[in-house]
Image (cartoon, rainbow, N blue to C red):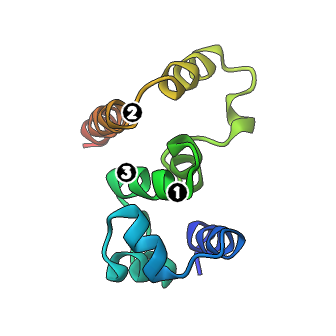
Amino acid sequence: MGTFAKWLVTEMQRQELNQSRLAKKAGLSRATIKLIVDQSTQKPEPDTLGKLAHALDLPVEELMRRAGYLPSRGAIEGNTTMARLIQVASELPDDELEELLYIALGKRDKRRK
């Protein structure tokens, strides 16, 4: 089980949620939750993470970090540009944060080609 999947299972246990209850709260299918928990999907999509964050009453930033979309907090220390970006992003509504993430990932993927 991957790191995100392990974390999600632990968080579900902490909040006394099973897969069906989490799926309902998040507006996702139980199959989607099962794919994440069984690690059939390596990295959940940002919109899925946003729905999970809302259902778990956690900041979407935390789930993005745990899924590997954002760097760890330790990687930010000493990097003022990254710290400022995280500060600005943390103040955005979830839909705007997801849009920012899509833009950033798209630009990164284009540079790699």
Query: Is 106 situated above or below 1?
Result: above
Q: Which numbered disc flags the more N-terminal residue, 3 or 2?
A: 3
Query: Is 40 situated above or below 54?
Result: below
Q: Give the left or right position of residue 34, taking residue 37 as reference.
A: left
Name which residue type carries label 1.
Ala
Query: Is 100 situated above or below 69?
Result: above
Write the residue at 37% across / 51% down.
46
Q: Which element type, helix, strand or loop, lies under badge 2? A: helix
Q: Give the left or right position of residue 99, taking residue 19 as reference.
A: left
The residue beneath circle 2 is 97
Name which residue type carries label 2.
Leu
Q: Which mark is residue 76?
A: none
Q: Which mark is residue 46?
A: 3
Which quarter of the rendering shows the C terminus?
Answer: top left
Q: Which mark is residue 67?
A: 1
Location of residue 78 by image quarter: top right
- Label 3 crowd bin: few (<14), some (14–19), many (20+), radius 10 Å: many
Q: Which element type, helix, strand or loop, lies under badge 3? A: helix
Q: Give the left or right position of residue 11, taking residue 102 as reference.
A: right
Who is closer to the viewer here, 17 or 70? 17
